[in-house]
Image (spheres, coloured by chain):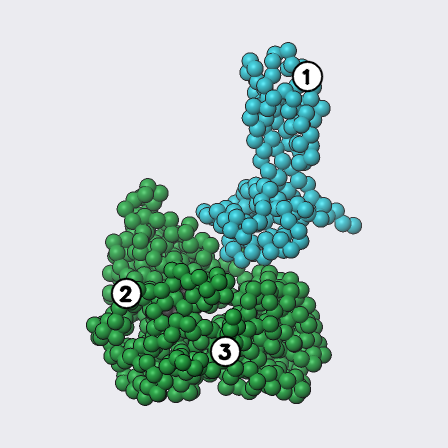
Amino acid sequence: MQHTLSVLVQNQAGVLSRVSGLFSRRGYNIESLAVGVTENEKISRMTIVVEGDNYVVEQVSKQLYKLVEVLKVSDITDEKYVGREMVLVTVSVEPSQRGEIIAITEIFKGRIVDLSRKTMMLELTGNEEKINAFVDALTSFGIKEMVRTGKIALVRGDIGE
Amino acid sequence: MTTMTGAKALVKILEEEGVKVVFGYPGGAILPVYSELQKSKIKHVLTRTEQGATHAANGYARATGTVGVCISTSGPGATNLVTGIATAYMDSIPLVAISGQVATSMVGTDAFQEVDITGITQPITKHNFLVTNPDDIPRVVKEAFHIARTGRPGPVLIDLPKNVAEALCHGKFISEVNLPGYKPTYKGNSKQIKEAVKLLKEGKRPLFYIGGGVAVSGAKQLGDLAHKLQIPVVNTLMGKGAFPAEDSLALGMLGLHGMPAANYAVSKCDVLFGIGVRFDDRVTITLDKFAPNAKIIHLDIDPAEIGKNVRRVDVPIVGDVATVLDTILEQVTPMEHKAWLSEVEAFKAANNKAYPAEAGYDLVSRQVVEKLSELTGGKIILTTDVGQHQMTAAQFYQANRLGGFISSGGLGTMGYGLPAALGAQMACPDDTVVCITGDGSLQMSINELATIKGQNLPVKVILFNNNCLALVRQLQHHFCNNEFFGVDFDGNPDFCMLAKAYGFEAYCITKTDEIESTLKEALANGKPTLIECLTNKEDMVYPIVLGGKGLDEMLIQADDK
Ligand SMILES: Cc1ncc(C[n+]2csc(CCOP(=O)(O)OP(=O)(O)O)c2C)c(N)n1
Ligand SMILES: [Mg+2]
């Protein structure tokens, strides 16, 4: 099963390598890892999607905690959170097919960000499922290049009483 | 605060941290630090390799319970630290290793003697630092000692580029470290402690299984608790010495080459309390046959150890051994386990002598170790190398002193014993320090005889020379159909002549009746001394638990097939 970990780390040189090194060395499978600074510029948030059962994820969290720069590890898989990923994809498009691509992009609420004689570059943000569906819909046209950011996530606020 | 160079700031903090001895080996990139060391009252011991320096610092740390310090230059000096750092990491020994580095302007250019030592040591250090700003030095060095020493101890490396060491340091000297991501848990969870107390009260056949964590913290509390509850104690290699072997509740080492009664007790107990241990594979051998009838309590300061190897832990407790055992002591009343103790005792009596000196050999290592144990009362500092001789020492040396048995457990590093003895003797000049080694292991660090002689240390080296790598040979006996390969030494030197060349006293013994007199003479001579004991390569270490077997299925004697 896939787990989503939200990890706060000190924003210091080498911390990304420590975290990724830990995963490969202990044989944990990272599906994706996205990292960026938080509201506090001294702290970064890593969103890590890891494949494994509860035992593996518990081990991952405990090992992460042992890194001196790691401040907090939360497994948010079962919490209410907003998860997003972004994709940039360049598709081969004959001028006659442009209308079709534009329609698909609109359906997914994506954007067209570049155009050449025979290609179009599209951008889409959404959860993993939506991105997968978008990419599937484009596959038949011929995907020339693609890049995905990996998931970023934040837990939803608690409205309370 | 007056400004000073980075190197001076570094040495100043070493002094503040109470460092008295550093083990090192210089070179270009570390020169600024050496210049400052020269002016300091810290003693520098020039070993013969950087690896020797790491093991010496390790032995020093283990003999004193303080942080050991070793220093190298960049490049090959730094890579020579690697085995020693890994050795310390696996055994949770507090070290601070300081390596020189090429100037920051050169870092990343494959400069002369540049290696990425922080990258290389990332998996084998508790933490490491590449210092790029001289102002960071006071904070970094302070943090390094704090991290090395607290929580689950371990090695920390500081990589110091030459220009950073030379530059002026304007950093503040701090007295407290502030590491928001590093907060070891000392106090155990009170609910879990209650659960543990309940299990201990209910158990009819309880057993303590203790490891290196008890040597770090709580040896006294462990002793008090074992006696109050009348619970027998088995120890790992790393736990040896943390509970006196002479104690009637002590059953000795468990595991692969564990003592018969210890392995028996693990298999028969109904409550197993693992204290400062990590359920290593050399202890458990076959997980589903390990302590099959027992409820398990696991106390360790490292949360990542709990549930890592043995997943069916009934009561996990994260905390410091001394702190948690203190709390448990308050919550228990004295108990008796007469039937259980006499059952274990009977097994011990029937089996511990089941593998005496094999007839036909003039000298076996067990006799020497037992005699050493008897003559010293188990109160000296004994270091070992790695091999059959190490297992024999672990089985038959009755360690009765905390920190008195120093051996490379987790990594099993040959070449550890002699430099570790050097470090221990530097730490405890008035104590007797003996290194038990083999002909293979000794030759991995034999150069350190010179360091020992140079420091005028009366270290005794007991060498079991069987002209082979006997522990590996034994593996080939059990698992490769007696097809021995790559284990015989042709061309071993005359070790006594060699030792004499290094300025050591030297004895060679070949017969049982020479053991006592030679040991007595050597222990009393006040000089660095080698005692070479010629032993037989056919000799094997028993008991052994073969793969797939439970501890109670150990082979106690040779399987004459
Ligand atoms: C650095 C290193 N290399 C290889 C090994 C594998 N190994 C374990 S025991 C052993 C034999 C040790 O020989 P010796 O020191 O003569 O001890 P003996 O078993 O003969 O008593 C070897 C090669 C090791 N533990 N460490
Ligand atoms: Mg040998």
Name the residue at the front extreme: B561
Depicted A134 relative to depicted B219: above or below: above
Q: Secondary structure at mark 3?
A: loop
Between discs 2 and 3, the one toward the N terminus: 3
Rendered-image quadrant of the N terminus of chain B: bottom left
Circle 1 SS class = helix
Near-viewer residue (B354 or B269): B354
Residue B506 coordinates in the image, percent (x, y): 26, 78
**Given the current orientation, which residue lies at the most extreme right position?**
A161
Chain B palette colour:
green
Q: Chain of mark 2?
A: B
For ligand 2, tell me if the residue under mark 2 lies within 8 Å.
Answer: no
Residue at mark 3 shares a chain with residue at mark 1:
no
Q: Which residue is mark 3?
A: B242
Question: Label 3, label 1: how many angstroms apart (C-alpha)?
Answer: 76 Å
Chain letter matching colour cyan: A
| Nearer-the-camera pick, B220 or B382 | B382
Judging by the rendered image, the residue that carries numbered circle 1 is: A100
Circle 2 sits on which residue?
B491
- Residue B444 point in image, percent of width and height: 33, 64
